[in-house]
Amino acid sequence: MKITFDWLKDHLKTNLKEKNLLEQLTNIGLEVESVESLSSDDQLFKVAKIIKTEKHPNADRLKVCDVNIGEKELKKVVCGATNANEGLITIYAPPGAIIPKTNTKLEIAKIRGVTSFGMLCSESELNLSDESDGITELSKKYEKNIGKSYFSKSKSNLIDLSITPNRPDCLGVKGIARDLAASGFGRLIVSKEKKIKFKTKQTIKVKINKEKGQGCSAFGSCVIKNVKNTESPQWLKDKLISVGQKPISAIVDITNYVMLDINRPLHAYDADKIEKGIIVRNSKSGEEFTALDNKIYKLEKGMCVISDNKGVLGLGGIIGGTRSGTEFDTKNILLESAYFDPRSIRNTAKKLNLDTDAKFRFERGIDPLSIETGLKKAASLIQEICGGEVSKIDIQKTESYKTKIINFDVNSFENIVGFKISEKEIQRILTDLGFIIKKEKNSLKLIVPSWRPDISQQIDIIEELVRISGYDKIKTIDPIKDRFKSTLTQTQRLFHFLQRAIASKGYLETITWSFTDQSYNDHFREAGKEIKIVNPISSELGVLRNSIFSNLIMYMCKNLDRGFKDLSIFEIGPVFTGSNPGEQKTVVCGLSAGKKSRLSWIDKERNIDLFDAKRDVVQTLSEVGYNSDHFFIDSKTPNYYHPGKSGRIFLDHSKDKVAAYFGEIHPNILKKIDIKTENLIGFEIFLENLKLSRKTLKDQKLKFSVSDFQKSERDFAFVVNKDVEAQELIGVISNVNPNLISNIKVFDVYEGENIPDNQKSIAISITIQSSEKTLNDKDLEKINNSIIEAVENKTGAKIRS
Amino acid sequence: MSDLKKIRDEFISKLKGKLDLAELNQIKSDLFGKNGLVSSQFKKIGTIDISKRKKFASDLNIIKDEFHDLINLKIKEIEKANINEKLEKEKIDVTLPERSFVRGKIHPVSQTIDEISSIFSEIGFSVEEGPDVENEYNNFTALNTPDNHPARDMHDTFYLDEKKERLLRTHTSPVQIRTMLKDKPPFKIIAPGRTYRSDSDQTHSPMFHQVEGLHIDKNINMGHLKGCLNYFIKEFFEVKKIKMRFRPSHFPFTEPSAEVDIGYEIKDGKIIIGEGDQWLEILGCGMVHPNVLKNVKVDPTKFQGYAFGIGIDRLAMLKYGINDLRAFFDCDYRWLNHFGFDPLDVPTNYRGLSR
């Protein structure tokens, strides 16, 4: 909402300065978005009088004018306008001025050999109107202003307010003035309605159809006959220009003025173009009309239209149509002032993707009791400027406005706001805001002003009171430290632990969009449901991610392109399994590219591999608190992993839920997205699949028992078929005698010479220790034999001698 | 001269000469080996005349101990010499680089969330969460923003179906609804998380982070709201004093509503929070609207309280001097390295929020 202090002063008597105004507006919730000072350039345009004209010596159509601009000397200006006659009062732009229309800077120029100091301006050049035929003609009244700035009237700054959607009343200057007055910033000027003589009957019949979903509940109108539509007078043009509106014609300007001044949208029809009467009705599917924006709109069923016998004239409360629009030659007009249901306005405008000043106001709620006020104000101005006879006002209604009454408990204010104001002050504020108050026994009975659709209950009154009293009066009460439950749940703690555990292994944490590129997502979606966003910001961000890999790979590529070679990144966040709330999982997803110890003087260079990722995952899960001795690992992984070089981890042998995947990304995917790196290794840890321990650390730490008896380490080498997994051997060994076998470590895997083709040798070191005694040779021999026997029997292995 | 004296004289002189470890071992074996000279003498003890036996045995033991001490001394000498010789050869250029290491980092948004959680934990708040995909009811209707409310225009919503029933939450406020429906009052929660609006330019990104706050109990008023936010802002920016301004505003789910500005100034191109006469809007808040409480079956005549919503990314930008919002989600390795935090820097109250 754009206003000027000058316009506000039509409704507000105040001696305060603009600086105070800006502060006060913000203090009462009418936030000042911006203040635009009119450029000083505008002050350069001066009222001037042509004293003498001569024909240009070298051009037939040009004149050389001596112009009085209020200085001692006359200025010589070359001008081509036919109306540049001696005695004309017009507008002069000196060298240096910027012409608003063309945005060009004037310079002293020689025109066909004669030097011209500045220019005499047409209205169109000054953006005052479209009139480009000849220079501006000012009335004799301006004689005394010669040499003064033409735009002196609008030196008031343009103030742009951000009006919250609950305050339609402040979409009119008067509403803003009322709020300011209530807050002590000046006094509201009560304007008297001008009396007009309503001579004739309203001759155009208006009917509101009673049908389901009718968006119009009241339609007021009057006919004004024999008008002469002209350009608006200067004061009106100035007013509109000062808030950035463009003057069009007196009738249109007047309706706009009334809308901006008291937030009462009106519409003027050319009465002669209406076929018989007005019918307000629901549109039929497929009906069409050409709106004032020169676009053809095809309507859906049930939109509120103003129509006549021939068809749609306009969309009620949104936009009028070209067929019945007013022109300069319009003689008779029908002026409309109606009430449209905000919901209906919004539905229609949304479907047609239409936004107009009227729509913006009606969808927020217009004062239903302003119908007559608006008509009278506009009609009297039209009569004043364009002449004509105004008919009596006709108001058709399907519903009457019901007064809203609130019983207000005075004590409720302090209860919510925390400080107290006197009942007298409460009454003063509410009265200033337009409430009518009846004092009852324990409360105030309040009649809510009709222009406040946002007020319907006690809390709304409290808001008004604290807003006008000032938020700075609210005390600052120190926080209460009472706690009802622990800050984080166990799952949340797990989230934070995993996040920092992974980062501590050299991964940079990233945060990427929850949505992704469909083609990338498809690589990692498997059988997952594709979840499309109906209105994505771009097609590359069209689906919710089924896996974090799609984004990580995309950004990994970007970083590789930046010239980085060895990178580890991760993200912890949601992936989506469906489009319903809750159909999401929290995943820790990591991705590493390149080599370990590249260009090292000390370490052997090697590609990063899946055992790096496996270490990071297993170590992290161990740190979180899971015993890695219990993990079960197999090679069944989603198809985006390399089928032979990836694995999944279960926390135990019950294989209930997959705790994590790790492995190389499938070479087909690398090829398709054309990523250039030595190796690309990823992992995913599924937070919700990790069982939460019921034991807290204080329970886990209770018992400490270790053996101090001598331990022995024994090495074994088994030859097994290639498809036998190390995990199987370890499982068999650990089951031989869990009391004695404490540590099993694979330290070599060998295939090749001396080993049959389809077999491999696995060397394992085993620690044997008793918690009861020192084991002697015989005991050790016995357990050695049991280990060999068990492994040979259960895995088909042979001990290597 | 007795045999013993002869042996003694011969070997003492040998042991005093220059020997290496092998030579010394040879001497040891010559003396104490199975048929060594000293060993042989011990075997002879039985055959010696009883009158001389005691003296012989005593002399022999003295010689034995003498040899032992001398040999041990010699061994230590040789070992020491060997180590010294080795050390002489083993000098290495320690200025060569160490084995390579990589440092992981925590994203500034995650760090900021932890900082926020730590501060609110101090004053008794617990952390709640809600899903990223929401239904229209929780995101709007339950929050007193019915269908066709103009306030919905302010939220450019991503929808997941044509009927507009499923959407990506446009704020964290639906967590209020979920929390209050799930439990009984009092409520004292914060809810940090991802939020989405179909907006993308310098200062808007389609995904961003918010933290919601909600405190509902008996007799919680706007003074408590002011106190809570004042405490939070001071703690978060780690300043002693803060200039703060509450401005009336409008949110459908709170009434009265306020927007909160903090004072700042620019000094040497850096933003200083808490001083100066410029205002910066940082959050929206208010008293939870009775309609919202009714929607979640909380009796507004018995319970009341406040709610607030803060942009996390913006807080992080202000605190750590980050200029471009979009860089948060751009995963530039250099940016992550620069603005990221060491994982050991866990924000806590006792150790300080940040280093």
Image (spheres, coloured by chain):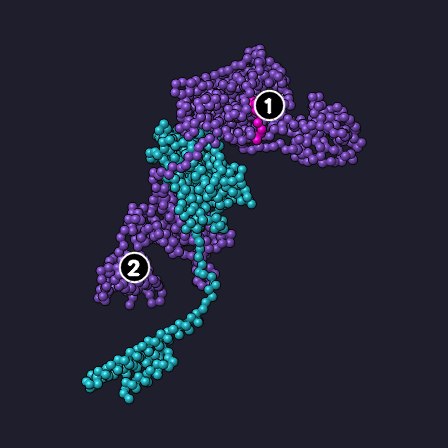
Chain colours: A purple, B cyan
Q: Is residue A188 magenta?
A: no
Residue tagged by mark 2?
A743
Amino acid type, mark 2: Asn
Q: Position of residue A686 (x, y in %)?
A: 36, 47
Q: Position of residue A495 (x, y in %)?
A: 37, 46
Residue B267 can be seen, yes or no = yes
Residue at 40% across, 23% down: A409
Residue at 52% across, 37% down: B279
- In-image side of A606 versus A648 (left or right): right
Closer-to-camera residue (A721/A455): A455
Residue A533 can be seen, yes or no = no
The image's mark for residue A253 is 1
Identify the magenta region: A10-19
Residue at 40% across, 38% down: B190
Q: Position of residue A612 (x, y in %)?
A: 39, 56
Looking at the image, the residue that sits furthest to the left is B50
Residue at 54% across, 22% down: A187
Task: Write down the chain letter for disc 1.
Answer: A
Amino acid type, mark 1: Asp
- In-image side of A316 versus B4 (left or right): right
Instruction: Classify mark 1: residues with Cα within 10 Å, few (<14), some (14-19) or many (20+).
Output: many
Decide: is A603 above or below A560.
below
SS under mark 2:
strand
Looking at the image, the residue that sits furthest to the right is A57
SS under mark 1:
helix
Instruction: Classify mark 2: residues with Cα within 10 Å, few (<14), some (14-19) or many (20+).
Output: some
Q: Residue B43, located in which quarter of the rendered image?
A: bottom left
